[in-house]
C-alpha cells in the first residue's frame, strides 16, 4: 500500500477527522458461498477526485463498488461517508439511511427503462423519493442533461439513442439525486474507443466543475493515465497498490501491477 494520498486534503465538503476522505472503507470483507472475494479491503477517496480501479477480472472490483453502494452487505469492516460511520463491523448504521443518496452508481449494461423517454427515466426515482414538483424536476433534468451534453434529447425515446448517448443519460439520471460520489463499473466497456472517451470525459468535467468524487472501474488506460488522480490496483480481494498514474505506469512496485502494466503496454 502506498503512503497516504496528499490529495485527500480536507476541503470543506470533505469529511473532518478522516484525513479529509469523503469515503473510506476499512477492513471490508465479503465472501460468497464461503469463498472470500474481498479481504479486508481499505480504500478512500476525497471530493473532487477520480480513482481508477484496475485489476484482473474476478479480483473483487465490482464487489467493492457494490458494497459501497449498499447493494451487497459486507461481512465485516467499516465504511465512513461524509464523516459519518455508515457501516460498522459489517452492519449498516442509522446514518446510512440519511447519506446513501450521496452515492450514485452506473453499470456497464444500460439500465434505462427502454419504454420510457429520457425525461421519465430521469424523473421517476426522484418523483417517488424526493417529493419534488414536476416543474422542479423538469428544470433539474434539463440541467443534468446539459451537463452530459444531451439537452436536445429530453423527449427522445431511449431505444432511439446510441450506446454512448444512453450511458450519458445514465450519468444524468444519477445526477438527478445530487450525488457527491459516483461509482462507475465498466460503463464504457461496450463502446467504441472514441465514444468511450467522450463518456469518460463527462466524469472529468463533473469532478472539475462539481467536485464530485468518481470511482471508476475501466480498462481504458488512456483515460486512466490522463484523468485519474490515483490508480488503485486490485488483486485477490484488496488494493495492493494505490498511486498516481505516472507511478503506476512507470514505476509499479508490486509484481502484480508490474505484470498488469506489461500486459497492456502497446
Ligand atoms: P471483478 O469486478 O474484479 O471482475 P467481482 O467483484 O465481480 O470481480 O467478482 C469477484 C468474485 O466474486 C468472482 O469470482 C465472482 O464470481 C464472485 N462473485 C461476485 N458476486 C457474486 C455473487 N453475488 N454470488 C456469488 N459469487 C459472486
Ligand atoms: Mg467487475
Image (tube, rainbow, N blue to C red):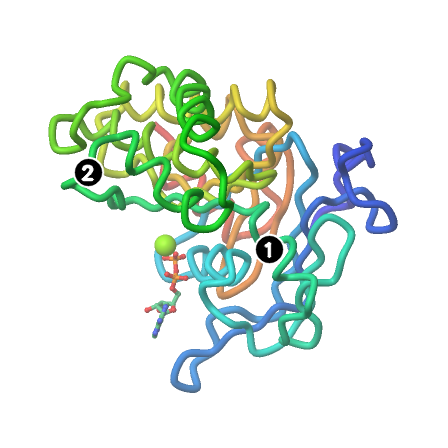
Tell me which numbered mark, 1 or 2, is placed earlier along the sequence: 2
Asked if labels 2 and 1 touch by Cβ distance under 8 angstroms, the answer is no
Q: Is residue 24 above or below residue 225?
A: below
Q: Position of residue 183 (x, y in %)?
A: 48, 45
Q: Residues within 10 Å of mark 2 (few under 14, many from 20)?
A: some
Q: Total of numbered circles in the picture? A: 2
Report helix, strand or loop for mark 2: loop
Would residue 101 be found to the left or right of residue 4 on screen?
left
Question: Is residue 61 among what the camera can see?
Answer: yes
Instruction: For residue 222, say whether it is visible.
Output: no
Comparing labels 1 and 2, the label whose residue is closer to the camera: 2
| 214 relative to 65, above or below | above
Question: Quarter holding the C terminus?
Answer: top left
Residue 9 in picture, x, y percent from top left: 81, 34
- The CA span between labels 1 and 2 is 43 Å
Q: Quadrant of residue 161?
A: top left
Q: Residue at x 53, y 24 (%)?
A: 206
Task: Place residue 84 in its image quadrant.
Answer: bottom right
Where is residue 220? Give x, y as percent: 37, 32
Q: Which residue is mark 2?
A: 116
Frontmost residue, 2 versus 7: 7
At 63% from the left and 69% from the top, the residue drawn is: 40
Residue most extreme to the bottom: 34
Q: Which residue in the protein does label 1 denote?
A: 240
The residue under the point 22% across, 26% down is 192
- Is ligand 2 within 8 Å of the beta carbon of the residue shown at mark 2? no
Q: Please give the name of the residue rendered at 28% of the width and 21% of the height, measured from the top-left corner.
A: 154
Amino acid at each position: 500500500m502506498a503512503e497516504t494520498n496528499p490529495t485527500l486534503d480536507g476541503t470543506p465538503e470533505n469529511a473532518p477527522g478522516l484525513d479529509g476522505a469523503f469515503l473510506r472503507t476499512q477492513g471490508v470483507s465479503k465472501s460468497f458461498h464461503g469463498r472470500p472475494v474481498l479481504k479486508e479491503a481499505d480504500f478512500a477517496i476525497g471530493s473532487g477526485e477520480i480513482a481508477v480501479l484496475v485489476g484482473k477480472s474476478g479480483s473483487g472490483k465490482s464487489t467493492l463498488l457494490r458494497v459501497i453502494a449498499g447493494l451487497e452487505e459486507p461481512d465485516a469492516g467499516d465504511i465512513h461517508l461524509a464523516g459519518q460511520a455508515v457501516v460498522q463491523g459489517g452492519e449498516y448504521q442509522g446514518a446510512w439511511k440519511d447519506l446513501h443518496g450521496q452515492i450514485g452508481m452506473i453499470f456497464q449494461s444500460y439500465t434505462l427503462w427502454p419504454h420510457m423517454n429520457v425525461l421519465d427515466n430521469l424523473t421517476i426515482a426522484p418523483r417517488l423519493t424526493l417529493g419534488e414538483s414536476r416543474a422542479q424536476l423538469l428544470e433539474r433534468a434539463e440541467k443534468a442533461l446539459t451537463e452530459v451534453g444531451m439537452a436536445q434529447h429530453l423527449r427522445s425515446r431511449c431505444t432511439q439513442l446510441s450506446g454512448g448517448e444512453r450511458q450519458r443519460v445514465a450519468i444524468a439520471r444519477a445526477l438527478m439525486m445530487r450525488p457527491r460520489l459516483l461509482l462507475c463499473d465498466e460503463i464504457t466497456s461496450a463502446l467504441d474507443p472514441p465514444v468511450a472517451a467522450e463518456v469518460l470525459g463527462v466524469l472529468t468535467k463533473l469532478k472539475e466543475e462539481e467536485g464530485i468524487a468518481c470511482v471508476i472501474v475501466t480498462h481504458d488506460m488512456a483515460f486512466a493515465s490522463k484523468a485519474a488522480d490515483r490508480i488503485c490496483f486490485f488483486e485477490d480481494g484488496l488494493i495492493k497498490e494505490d498511486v498516481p498514474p505516472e507511478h503506476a505506469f512507470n514505476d509499479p512496485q508490486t509484481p502484480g501491477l508490474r505484470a498488469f502494466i506489461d500486459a497492456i503496454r502497446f
